[in-house]
Image (cartoon, rainbow, N blue to C red):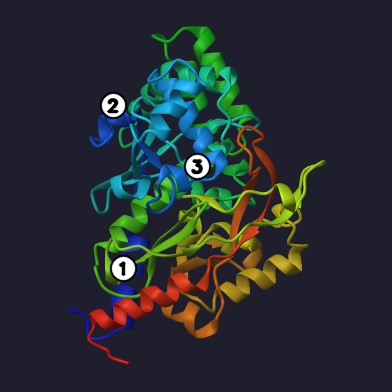
Amino acid sequence: MGYKTINEANEAVNQKIIAAAPFLTDVVPAKSVIPELEEHVLLHAGPPIKYENMTDPMQGSCVGAILFEGWAEDEEGARELLENGKITFIPCHHVNAVGPMGGITSPNMPVLVVVNKENGNEAYCQMNEGIGAVLRFGAYNEQVVNRLHWMKDVLGPVLSKALKTMEDGLNVNVLIAKAIAMGDEFHQRNIAASLAFLKEVAPIISALEDVEKEKRTEVIQFLADTDQFFLNIAMATGKAMMDAAATIGHGTVVTAMCRNGENFGIRIAGMGDEWFTAPVNTPQGLYFTGYSAEDANTDIGDSAITETMGVGGVAMIAAPAVTRFVGSGGFNDALETSNQMTEIYIGENPNFAIPTWDFKGACLGLDARKVVETGITPVINTGIAHKIAGYGQIGAGTVNPPIECFEKAITAYAEKLGFKE
């Protein structure tokens, strides 16, 4: 296999992760960097899925994207296109992209461009819409569609101009290293990183003389209001890092985790782009007033790329302030969670030191073998969507992948290496 042992291959994968040099370089229309995004094509989160098997929030996101693109004039027309098979669906992961929650991405939506300068590959993710009624949770009313147009016409172009004034773009590793020391874990909590991002771009935006003052003010205010803005940057960064790591082509390190409301899917380095899937679980956590577990949608989204790169739920110890918000208790519970995760991750990432963990590095290299051996699955922080489109986020919590995904991956890799039962 080119490596004497699986451990040696896994170490090569981990070195690729450590060496990654992700830079946020631009914000562009999705179709300009993803040629597969043609007329009547939508991207979605998770492994492949048919429209009829999508949960209601993901279907609602499809309606909103169609209305945004102008492919239909109203919901009825959008539903007709969807139900008659007139829309082609592609997983975000198949085209160097990731998407939050439903992950529905259409040709004219602006996407963040993160370049891994160590490897030369790019990854993309749409921008965070803020909170409330938003497309990623299945809302598709006029307010949602109007916000998407503002993001296309104002937010994207202004951020693009700002980023292009930087010689190399924005060094994301530096922002992550700063923010993990300030209490972020980059899945459920991104307040510090979002503010650090604002700190970098606000002076530049303010000085853009070829942009109307009103638009500059709108963009800065939106970024100041959007605590989770950095999540989408972290997702694109994780995708760029893990896609580069996957080029090793050997080993049992997990290179992608994602979910579509029907199935949870993983990839491992030694099996390339092949998905190993099993039915998703439903997140457990705390609910906003008036909602309960009966209202919760099954697990969706590509945001588990954060746990794949070793942050998010597995780095709970970095973000004590978020533990009670996701229903996991207090500091000691966070410490116990992160300590347990060291049993299934191979090492530590020296780029992301965690002060509250005695400056240990964030977890590095999720080993599918160790998951199967121990029965421990990674903890994933997540928002909880209402199972009916339009309600949006109704809580926050944690979820674990089904262990069957890891068992299938290890069995397939063993067969590839010639091991027989």
SS category of the residue bearing label 1: helix
Which mark is first along the chain, 1 or 2? 2
Disc 1 residue type (three-letter): Ala
**Are dots 2 and 3 in contact, CB under 8 Å?**
no
Classify 10 Å Cα crowding around label 1: few (below 14), some (14-19), many (20 and above): many
Disc 2 residue type (three-letter): Glu
Numbered label attached to residue 269:
1
Task: In the rendered view, tell whether residue 407 sits above or below residue 98.
Answer: below
Query: Comparing marks 2 and 1, which lies closer to the viewer?
Result: 2
Q: Nearer the viewer, residue 221 or 49?
A: 49
Disc 3 residue type (three-letter): Gly
Numbered label attached to residue 39:
2
Query: Comparing marks 1 and 3, which lies closer to the viewer?
Result: 3
Q: Seen from this angle, which residue lies furthest right? A: 289
Q: Quadrant of residue 25?
A: top left
Q: Quadrant of residue 31?
A: top left
SS category of the residue bearing label 2: loop
**Are dots 2 and 1 in contact, CB under 8 Å?**
no
SS category of the residue bearing label 3: loop
Report how far apart the C-alphas of labels 2 and 1 lie in the structure.
33 Å
Q: Residue at x 61, y 76 (%)?
A: 340
Report how far apart the C-alphas of labels 1 and 3 lie in the structure.
25 Å
Horizontal and vertical percent position of residue 19: 33, 60
Task: In the rendered view, tell whether residue 232 sits above or below residue 73.
Answer: below
Residue named by callout 3: 102
Which mark is first along the chain, 3 or 2? 2
Is residue 92 visible in the rendered structure shown here? yes
